[in-house]
Amino acid sequence: MRLNNHPELSLLKDHNLVGVTFIQNYLQLLMEGLYESPILNGYVWPWIKTDKGIFSIESLGYRDALCEQIGKKLVNVLDNNEEIVLIFSDNAEIHFSIKECDKTGPEAVMLQMGNITCVW
């Protein structure tokens, strides 16, 4: 069973992913927003599960699999003490580990939405 420890993440539900930005050592997912477009920064590379398979940063097709979610609606967000999972309308899932052992810096994921900033 998954816990929803961070209700702020539920604010992303029912919004479309509108952009994926690859920065040198992290990823940004841009969501459509009502007043401020939410941005989810991943400082750990997530893995993604689609109907085509499971992809990690080392996988051929990883970036394509992430970008194929652009325009798709986020239908659920789950989180616990180990990961944050974004579930899309096509049943694709993006998994961000938030375990200490997987972090390469002080944070794994950061949500920025208006005056709300949450860090894991």
Image (spheres, grey):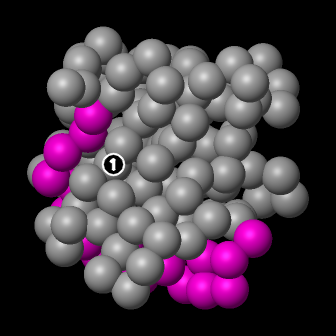
Q: Which is nearer the eye, 32 or 88?
A: 88
Q: In which quarter of the image is residue 20?
A: bottom right
The reply to whether residue 66 is in sight is no
The reply to whether residue 46 is in sight is yes
Q: Is residue 71 magenta?
A: yes
Q: Where is residue 33 in the image (x, y as percent from the top left)?
A: 28, 48
Q: In this view, does 102 lie above or below 81?
A: below
Q: Position of residue 95 (x, y in %)?
A: 46, 48
- The amino acid pointed to by label 1 is Leu
Neighbours of disc 1 within 10 Å: few (<14), some (14-19), many (20+):
many
Q: In which quarter of the image is residue 100?
A: top right
Left or right side of 9 for 20: right
Give me the residue at 49% from left, 25% from top: 82
Q: In this view, does 28 lie above or below 101?
A: below
Q: Which is nearer the eye, 36 or 3?
A: 3
According to the image, label 1 marks what residue? 86
Give me the residue at 25% from left, 71% from top: 72
Q: Position of residue 110 (x, y in %)?
A: 57, 30
| Residue extent of the magenta highlight | 58-78
